[in-house]
Image (tube, helix red, strand yellow):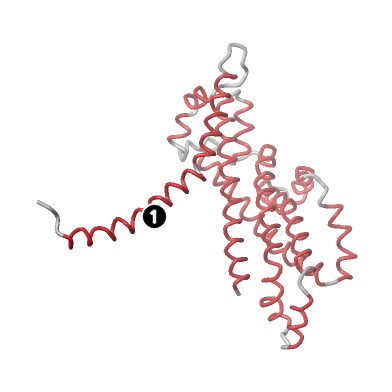
Amino acid sequence: MRASPSTDSASRPLLGGWTPNLQGIRDALVQKLLPPVIILAVLGAIWEILCSSPGATLPPPSQVLTDTWELIVNPFYDYGGNDKGMGWQILASLERVAYGYLLAVVAGISLGVLVGQSTWAMRGLDPVFQVLRTVPPLAWLPISLAGFQDSTPSAIFVIFITAIWPIIINTSVGVRNIPEDYRNVARVIRLNGMEYFTRIMLPAAAPYIFSGLRIGVGLSWLAIVAAEMLIGGVGIGFFIWDAWNASMISDIVLALIYVGIVGFILDRMVGYIGNRVTRGTAQG
């Protein structure tokens, strides 16, 4: 039997409404997901071919997967002491990073605003900052261990001293680059110091601040992995060093993959927050 015109007209809007959405999702997946998948597949194939030869010293991906399968499927085991799963190792490192990075954010933005607002402070502090920021992160570890007499605060200090410099520099540049028209408006409407800080300075300098925060979080993750190799305890850095001492190369490869993924996620999180904040600032 032929369908009635009313049935055809009722079904047509539904199909018409869904088709563009499905097409958009498919196009987004093809454009954003397909290229990295292809690149990773090609790199994995090259890695497999190069490391499968008889004289290869590094394991191919297939062997890494076989050797580390228990670590992959059970990341949160805890057999006591430092014998913990990869999930606990990463969480311990992230906890140290969180403390050190948040301290760097508070101190870095505060000092950046001071240096950006005050010419006297910039002339006095900028040379000090430029000298201290060139010191490698691990060079601070012996000093922090001597001062704190404990590995955990020492690692947090290394993260703090590593992440603070890009935050200070980018914040000060953003504050110095606030348009003069904004400052004039603040004078005309007679904003007090706190109102000027929250309604003029922070919104105008937000893109610069978040650029520094994004660089800082990446440096924090790099610093903690290196520091944990020396301080020991639970953490992804010490896990890598312990695996090296035990000649477990596949465990090291898996840990490096996890380190890269976590660093990527941290960068994208700060970038996402920055995009939301700066977009709202621009609309405001």
Q: Nearer the viewer, residue 12 or 65?
A: 12
Q: Residue 150 at what x, y percent from top left?
A: 69, 47
x and y percent of residue 176 in the render? Answer: 80, 68
Which residue is tagged 1? Answer: 21
User: Which residue does the image show at 62% across and 12% down from the upper left?
Assistant: 55
Q: Please state the horizontal and vertical placement of residue 49, each as a whole percent of the image.
A: 56, 19
Q: Residue furthest left?
A: 1
Q: Identify the image quadrant of residue 252.
A: top right
In the foreground, 71 or 51: 51
Task: Indicate the secondary structure of the residue bearing disc 1.
Answer: helix
Q: How many marks?
A: 1
- Name the quarter where the C terminus is drawn: bottom right
Q: In this rendering, would 127 be left or right of 54?
A: right
Q: Find the residue positioned furthest to the bottom.
A: 189
Residue farthest along the top direction in this orientation: 54
Residue at horizontal 60 percent and vertical 35 percent from the top:
256
- Say if 227 sits above or below 164 in the image: above
Q: Residues within 10 Å of mark 1 (few under 14, many from 20)?
A: few
Q: Amino acid at mark 1?
A: Asn
Q: Nearer the viewer, residue 43 or 244?
A: 43
Point out residue 258 in the picture as x, y percentages from the top left corner. 55, 39
Asked whether, in this view, residue 242 is left or right of residue 230, the answer is: left
Which image quadrant for residue 101? Answer: bottom right
